[in-house]
Amino acid sequence: MTLRTYSLSIEAPASRVWAVVSDLASWPDLTPSINSLVAVGDWGIIPGNKFLIDQPKLRRAVWTVTDVRPGRFFAWESGGAGLRTRGTHEVTEGPGGAVVILTIEQRGLLGPVVGALAGSLMERYIELEAAGFKERSEHPVVS
């Protein structure tokens, strides 16, 4: 198993940060680590819902929501035989605002290999994702 965790303090209320994190349709606008994110069915973050994600330098993948704590946390998984990847997104109260905690976990026979080959890219992508959440939460788009 390979596990990477990244956390970032955000000067905004946890409710605002969660609104940004849970707005999956806006992710391609928040981070260069996602080219597109499309619901395969319903857009809700509900266990069983699926999303097709296209990322630079990675294969397109379908991610299935596996766990949700509304307003606070969701997890989703992708993969197949030999490799299973789990990503989590958590928002907690922090000093002066909120903290976003992102993790990526790879399990299976190919987990250590993929972790060694693509680990730095995955770390960079979760850092970019967190930075996008921070920017949008601290400086909301006014329409």
Image (tube, helix red, strand yellow):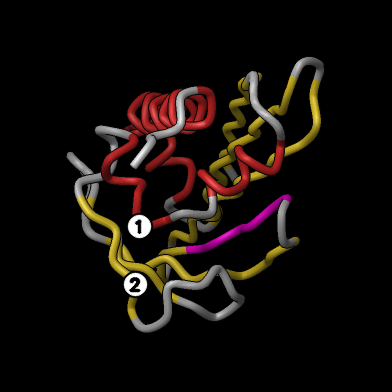
- Residue 5 shown left or right of residue 71 in the figure: left
- Residue 44 shown left or right of residue 7 in the figure: left
Which labelled disc corresponds to residue 35? none
Whether pointer 1 and pointer 2 mark residues with C-beta atoms closer than 8 Å, the reply is yes
- Residue 23 shown left or right of residue 75 in the figure: left
Q: How packed is label 1: few (under 14 Cα within 10 Å), some, or many (20 or more)? A: some
Residue 4: x %, y % from top left: 57, 32
Of the pair 106 and 38, the residue shown nearer to us: 38
Q: How packed is label 2: few (under 14 Cα within 10 Å), some, or many (20 or more)? A: some
* Mark 1 residue type: Ala
Viewer-nearest of discs 1 and 2: 1
Name the quadrant containing residue 78: bottom left
The N terminus lies in which quarter of the figure? Answer: top right
Where does label 1 land, which residue?
A: 25
Residue 135: x %, y % from top left: 44, 24
Residue 64: x %, y % from top left: 48, 71
Magenta residues span 72-77
- The answer to whether 15 is drawn above or below residue 23 in the figure is above
Distance between the alpha carbons at the discs numbered 1 and 2: 8 Å
Looking at the image, which residue is at 59% across and 37% down? 102
Name the quadrant containing residue 93: top right
Of the pair 55 and 3, the residue shown nearer to us: 55
Of the pair 2 and 61, the residue shown nearer to us: 61
Looking at the image, which residue is at 35% across and 57% down? 25
Residue 81: x %, y % from top left: 41, 71
Per the image, label 1 sits on a secondary structure element best described as helix
- The answer to whether 132 is drawn above or below residue 89 in the figure is above
